[in-house]
């Protein structure tokens, strides 16, 4: 029995929420079976936008299977077998289309002949060829619709429906009893566990003055934690009508920028939260056909970069957009590759990013050029950062490694690897001396690894300071962040917890 479009979207969302689970042969076969179901469903789905979304699903999970098996599964969407157009990209062979065009021209010519009593004049001007998308076209400005904020929000799917109960006080957990491997100092103190989310915490952001920590999850909640009391700033969290995937504070800390999504069914949107009122000020319409996986604000707070693994709704090659952080109005859009992580350079003139094709890219926003790494990670890139001097790009991947690249030419530098089986996020400390990674061990336990960045740049064989999850049987960490004053390290887990370590 073929899956319906709604069933495909639901299964895609379920698989995305369990990405951090240990990869077993049974799971690979499950994903392969899902891909086959999506391929077959194309025969019954005619809507062009839905077909484009199915292709996005196939691209994503086919790449995932290749990472595990080094073989691409059959992933060509079956042509629509009913009546009507099967999709924006017609599923007919080009020779057939060409014959159809010739026949159409002949019919038009005949009609003109009989209408005018003579032959159509020869020597017609040649038709222009259809432009082909390149990897680095000039920026294309796009206008996402800004919609008015509705007081009530559309409910999330049942699995992600948030609760409105007051949030509990933090739980103090002593440091791990195991002796950590040598690494950078200072040693983190007693861990605090902040409980309030009911699903995966995918995003963390500290306010510029280090007084607030924002956490966002797949339960749709955004919680603002007051770091002076280690309690929520508001009795009830803000609840979005979408899942939260990325967060960034405005330069003055008065607003929180949110990248959201509900998979391919709801698409990706951008929103602005008033921090003082705990209310949404703005929300765009659908900007990408999939979740807004990454956000970054430049140093002076004038440009907001957003990236997605799903292309823009108006152009199937656009995965990167720049917007005004105050109004969310567009500045520029770029044809690019699917993006899962991005970061501005210290001077704000360059963007580094990576995603499902496992390469690192650096785009020069002034010159309009883009460079890509000659070598790649072995799996999806989940985290990116620039060193404070702009000389290095740091990347983290689901292959379990952290890699350093010379930013000017993206030549490969040191590779850091220790206990992590898969890395889902990274952060650079405010002094630029340490790199923190949010990861999972081979048996599925969450851990944070702290690396001495300076020693790595010098080419020394460094060992990380390892922080395991303070909670028993806790799953993977999916997000990590340093506070700007260097006092705190925060990590978000698959179980909905936010773990906070004091650094001084």
Image (cartoon, grey):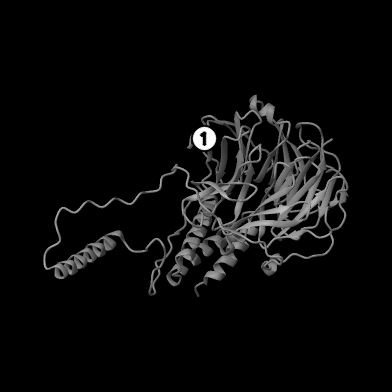
Q: Is residue 233 left or right of residue 442?
A: right
Instruction: Say above or below: 96 vs 354.
Output: below
Residue at position x 72%, y 46% in the image: 205
The percent coordinates of residue 198 (x first, y second) are 76, 61
Q: Hey, which residue is sitting farthest left in the picture?
A: 118
- Left or right: 322 in relation to 299: left
The quarter holding residue 75 reads bottom left
Q: Is residue 399 visible?
A: no
- Choose top left, top right, bottom left or bottom right for residue 74: bottom left
Q: Is residue 301 above or below residue 62?
A: above
Instruction: Please name whichever residue, 183 or 255, is drawn nearer the observer in this view of the structure.
Output: 255
How crowded is the residue under tag 1: few (<14 C-alpha within 10 Å), some, or many (20+)?
Answer: few
Q: Residue at x 52, y 72 (%)?
A: 4
Q: Is residue 226 above or below residue 284?
A: above
Q: Position of residue 454 (x, y in %)?
A: 69, 27
Residue 391 image-quadrant placement: top right
Q: Is residue 159 visible?
A: yes
Q: Secondary structure beneath disc 1? A: loop
56, above or below 440, in the image: below
Give the image location of residue 384, x and y in percent: 62, 40
- Which is nearer the eye, 400 or 191? 191
Residue nearer the viewer, 36 or 329? 329
Q: Which residue is mark 1?
A: 366
Determine whether, in the image, residue 338 is placed left or right of residue 441. Answer: left
Q: How many marks?
A: 1
Residue 120 picture location, percent across and down: 15, 61
Q: Quadrant of the C terminus?
A: top right
Left or right? Give the position of 208 relative to 110: right
Q: Residue farthest to the top?
A: 458
């Amino acid at each position: 029995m073929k899956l319906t479009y709604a069933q495909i979207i639901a299964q895609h969302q379920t698989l995305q929420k369990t990405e951090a689970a240990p990869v077993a042969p049974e799971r690979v076969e499950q994903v392969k079976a899902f891909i086959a179901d999506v391929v077959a469903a194309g025969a019954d789905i005619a809507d062009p936008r839905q077909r484009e979304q199915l292709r996005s699903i196939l691209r994503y999970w086919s790449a995932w299977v290749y990472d595990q098996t080094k073989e691409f599964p059959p992933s060509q969407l079956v042509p629509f077998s009913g009546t009507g157009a099967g999709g924006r990209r017609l599923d007919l062979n080009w020779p057939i289309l060409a014959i159809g065009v010739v026949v159409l021209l002949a019919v038009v010519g005949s009609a003109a002949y009989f209408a005018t009593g003579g032959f159509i004049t020869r020597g017609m001007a040649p038709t222009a060829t259809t432009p082909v998308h390149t990897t680095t076209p000039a920026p294309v400005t796009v206008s996402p619709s800004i919609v008015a904020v509705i007081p009530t929000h559309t409910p999330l799917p049942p699995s992600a429906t948030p609760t409105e109960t007051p949030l509990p006080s933090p739980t103090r957990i002593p440091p791990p009893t195991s002796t950590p491997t040598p690494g950078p100092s200072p040693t983190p103190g007693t861990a605090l566990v902040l409980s309030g989310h009911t699903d995966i915490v995918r995003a963390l952001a500290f306010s510029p003055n280090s007084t607030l920590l924002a956490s966002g999850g797949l339960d749709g909640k955004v919680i603002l934690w007051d770091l002076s009391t280690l309690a929520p700033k508001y009795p009830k969290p803000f609840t979005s009508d979408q899942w939260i995937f990325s967060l960034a504070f405005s330069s003055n800390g008065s607003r929180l920028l949110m990248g959201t999504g509900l998979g391919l069914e709801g698409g990706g949107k951008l929103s602005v939260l008033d921090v003082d009122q705990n209310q949404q000020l703005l929300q765009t319409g659908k900007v990408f056909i999939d979740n807004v996986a990454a956000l970054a604000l430049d140093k002076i707070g004038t440009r907001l970069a957003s990236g997605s693994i799903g292309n823009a709704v108006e152009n199937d090659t656009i995965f990167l957009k720049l917007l005004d952080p105050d109004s969310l109005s567009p500045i520029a859009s770029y044809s690019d590759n699917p993006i899962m992580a991005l970061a501005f350079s210290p001077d704000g003139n360059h963007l580094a990013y990576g995603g499902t094709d496992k390469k690192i890219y650096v785009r020069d926003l002034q010159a309009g050029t883009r460079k890509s790494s000659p070598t790649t990670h072995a799996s999806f890139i989940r985290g990116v950062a620039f060193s404070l001097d702009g000389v290095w790009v740091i990347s983290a991947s689901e292959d379990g490694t952290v890699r350093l690249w010379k930013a000017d030419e993206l030549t490969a530098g040191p590779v850091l690897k220790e206990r992590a089986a898969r890395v889902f996020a990274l952060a650079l400390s405010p002094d630029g001396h340490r790199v923190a990674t949010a990861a999972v061990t081979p048996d599925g336990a969450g851990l944070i690894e702290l690396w001495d960045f300076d020693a790595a740049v010098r080419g020394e064989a460094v060992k990380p300071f390892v922080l395991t999850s303070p909670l028993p049987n806790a799953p993977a960490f999916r997000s990590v962040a340093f506070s700007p004053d260097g006092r705190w390290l925060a990590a978000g887990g698959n179980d909905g917890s936010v773990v906070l370590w004091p650094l001084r």
